[in-house]
Amino acid sequence: MSRADKPLPPLSYLQPRIRVSRAIAGLAYVGLLACLFVYNAFFRDLHGANPLVIGGFMLIPLLIFLPGIISGNPRVHAWLCFAINLYFAYGVLACLQPERQLYGAVLVGTSVTYFIAALGYVRWSFQAMRVRSNATTA
């Protein structure tokens, strides 16, 4: 026995949620980039290493997704949810060091905020795509 498909919500329900979740995800993404850049460029003791190299190493995985984030591609947001888990784990490890607790808390907060907002954005965007495709075929 197969289950009946749930009815999709109307576009009037989905559109505001898509806008808000994308805005929150974008702010969290920019916050994560800024936190990594500022901490690695100005506050981290690198023992003589070049801060541009270390900062670039931390930022490049996030910057790979930048064009898709700017264009609002839901698939890029979904893939970044996988990559953002690395920064979450890095933030948790930083929280365990007393001199880096604030930095770690900001990393954890921004990565969790991005993850939750991006999941909402991806879900509602794909639902809106299905509603639009059903409206054109029906």
Image: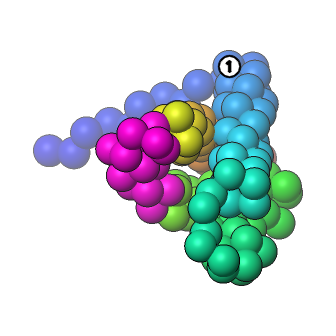
Q: Quadrant of residue 27?
A: top right
> Quarter holding the N terminus?
top left
Which SS does the magenta portion mostly show? Answer: helix
Judge by depth and name the residue closer to the eye, 81 or 1: 81
Residue 71 in the image: x percent, y percent? 85, 57
> Quarter holding the C terminus?
top right
Residue situated furthest left in the rendering: 1
User: According to the image, label 1 marks what residue?
Assistant: 13
- Whether residue 85 is visible, yes or no, is no
Which residue is drawn at the image coordinates 70% and 32% (left, top)? 24
Judge by depth and name the residue closer to the eye, 54 or 13: 54
Provide the residue span drawn in magenta.
86-101
Which residue is drawn at the image coordinates 37% and 46% (left, top)? 97
Q: Quadrant of residue 56?
A: bottom right
Which residue is drawn at the image coordinates 72% and 41% (left, top)? 31
Q: Residues within 10 Å of mark 1 (few under 14, many from 20)?
A: few
Residue 32 in the magenta stretch? The answer is no
Q: Is residue 57 left or right of residue 34?
A: left
Judge by depth and name the residue closer to the eye, 134 or 104: 104
